[in-house]
C-alpha cells in the first residue's frame, strides 16, 4: 500500500441523541452508536518520518517481536472485509460509520508498514483478499475476531507500557490504534444488537446460526493458534497470544487476565454508558480467573529436597 492516504470527510446531519435511556434496536440507538464512532474520528496520517528515534537496543527489541507479518495481514483482511460490508449497507449514516471503520483498518495497516519501514523491520507482503461472497459474514468474522483480540491487546499494550521496554514516545504513537480498536468493538456489538432487532423475523434464526458458525470458526482458529504457536508458526489468530509471551514480565495467567479486565473496563468505560459493550471475553476471563485463582498454588521446592 504505497498510494497516499486520503482522510475521509466525516460530515453528517444526524441530530444528537437526547439524554435518557435508549432502547437497543431503536432509531435513536442507531444514531447513538454511529455518531459515537463518527464524532470521535481522529485525523492523522501515519508516515515513516513520524516515528520517534529509537536506540539500537529498543529497535532490536521491536524488530524481534514475532508479530509483524500477521499483524499487517490481519489489518489487510479487516480493511477488505469491513469495506466490502460498508458498500452494501443501505442506511447512509450507518454506511458512513462502517466505511470509517474500514478506513481506520486500512490506516492501521499503514501504521504498521510505516513503523516497519522506519525501523528496518522486514514484513511479508500481505495476502490478496478477494471480495467476500457474503459481506455480512466477513464483517461478523472481523467484528467478533476483534472482540476477542482487542481484549487481550488492551492488557498486552499495558504490560508493554509498564515494562518500559519501549520509549514513551513510541507507546504514545501506537496508542491511537488500540483506542480505535476499542471504538470498533463497541460499534460492532451495538450494530449486531440493532441489526438483529431490525431484520425480518424469518431471518433471525438464520442470523443466529451464522453468528454461531462465526464463533465456531474463530474458536477453531484459536485452537489452531495453540498448535501453530507450539510449532513456532505465525498466523492471523496468534497475533495477541504470541505477543503475550514476548514480554518477560512477572505476571501469571490470572494476573494477566485481571489486567485485561481492568484495561477493558477503563477503556470501554469511557464510551457513552447507553452503548452496549462486548461481554463475552470479560465473562470468560472472569470465569478463568476464578478457576485459576482457586487452583492450589505450586509450592516452592526446597533446595536439596
Ligand atoms: Fe485494526
Ligand atoms: Fe478494528
Image (spheres, helix red, strand yellow):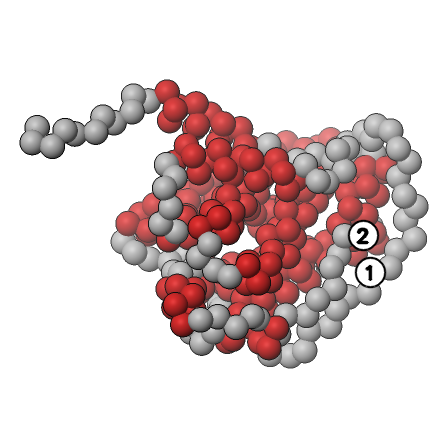
Q: Tell me where residue 169 sits by quadrant.
A: bottom right
Residue named by callout 1: 10
Name the residue at 85% across, 38% down: 27
- For label 1, being within 8 Å of ligand 2 is answered no
| Residue 172 % position (x, y) | 60, 58
Name the residue at 81% across, 29% down: 23
Give the vertical position of 191 relative to 105 (above or below).
above
Residue named by callout 2: 39
Q: Which quarter shows the C terminus?
A: top left
Q: Tell me where residue 82 sits by quadrant.
A: bottom right
| Residue 119 % position (x, y) | 47, 74
Task: Assess disc 2: are there few (<14), some (14-19) or many (≥20) residues with their C-alpha within 10 Å of its C-alpha.
Answer: few
Give the vertical position of 211 relative to 173 (above or below).
above
Q: Which quarter shows the N terminus?
A: bottom right
| Residue 97 % position (x, y) | 76, 53
Label 2 sits on a secondary structure element that is: loop
Cα distance, mark 1 to mark 2? 8 Å
Q: Is residue 251 visible to us here?
A: yes
- Check whether the beta carbons of the residues at disc 1 and disc 2 lie within 8 A of each other: yes
Q: Report the disc number at residue 289.
A: none
Q: Nearer the viewer, residue 242 or 218?
A: 242
Q: Residue furthest left?
A: 304
Judged left or right of residue 23, residue 124 is: left
Amino acid at each position: 500500500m504505497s498510494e497516499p492516504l486520503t482522510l475521509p470527510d466525516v460530515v453528517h446531519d444526524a441530530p444528537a441523541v437526547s439524554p435518557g435511556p435508549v432502547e437497543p434496536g431503536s432509531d435513536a440507538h442507531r444514531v447513538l452508536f454511529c455518531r459515537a464512532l463518527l464524532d470521535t474520528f481522529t485525523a492523522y496520517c501515519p508516515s515513516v518520518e513520524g516515528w520517534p528515534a529509537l536506540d539500537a537496543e529498543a529497535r532490536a527489541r521491536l524488530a524481534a517481536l514475532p508479530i509483524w507479518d500477521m499483524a499487517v495481514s490481519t489489518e489487510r483482511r479487516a480493511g477488505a472485509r469491513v469495506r466490502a460490508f460498508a458498500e452494501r449497507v443501505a442506511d447512509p449514516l450507518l454506511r458512513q460509520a462502517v466505511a470509517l471503520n474500514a478506513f481506520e483498518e486500512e490506516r492501521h495497516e499503514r501504521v504498521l508498514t510505516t513503523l516497519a519501514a522506519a525501523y528496518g523491520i522486514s514484513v511479508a507482503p500481505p495476502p490478496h483478499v478477494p471480495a467476500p461472497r457474503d459481506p455480512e459474514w466477513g464483517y461478523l468474522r472481523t467484528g467478533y475476531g476483534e472482540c476477542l483480540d482487542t481484549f487481550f491487546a488492551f492488557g498486552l499494550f499495558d504490560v508493554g507500557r509498564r515494562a518500559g521496554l519501549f520509549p514513551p514516545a513510541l507507546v504514545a504513537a501506537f496508542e491511537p490504534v488500540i483506542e480505535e480498536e476499542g471504538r470498533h468493538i463497541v460499534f460492532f456489538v451495538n450494530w449486531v444488537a440493532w441489526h438483529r432487532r431490525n431484520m425480518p423475523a424469518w431471518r433471525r434464526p438464520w442470523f443466529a446460526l451464522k453468528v454461531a458458525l462465526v464463533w465456531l470458526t474463530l474458536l477453531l482458529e484459536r485452537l489452531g493458534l495453540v498448535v501453530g504457536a507450539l510449532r513456532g508458526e505465525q498466523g492471523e489468530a496468534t497475533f495477541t497470544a504470541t505477543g503475550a509471551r514476548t514480554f518477560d514480565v512477572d505476571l501469571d495467567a490470572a494476573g494477566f487476565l485481571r489486567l485485561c479486565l481492568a484495561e477493558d473496563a477503563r477503556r470501554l468505560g469511557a464510551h457513552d454508558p447507553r452503548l452496549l459493550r462486548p461481554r463475552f471475553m470479560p465473562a470468560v476471563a472472569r470465569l478463568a480467573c476464578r478457576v485459576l485463582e482457586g487452583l492450589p498454588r505450586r509450592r516452592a521446592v526446597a533446595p536439596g529436597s
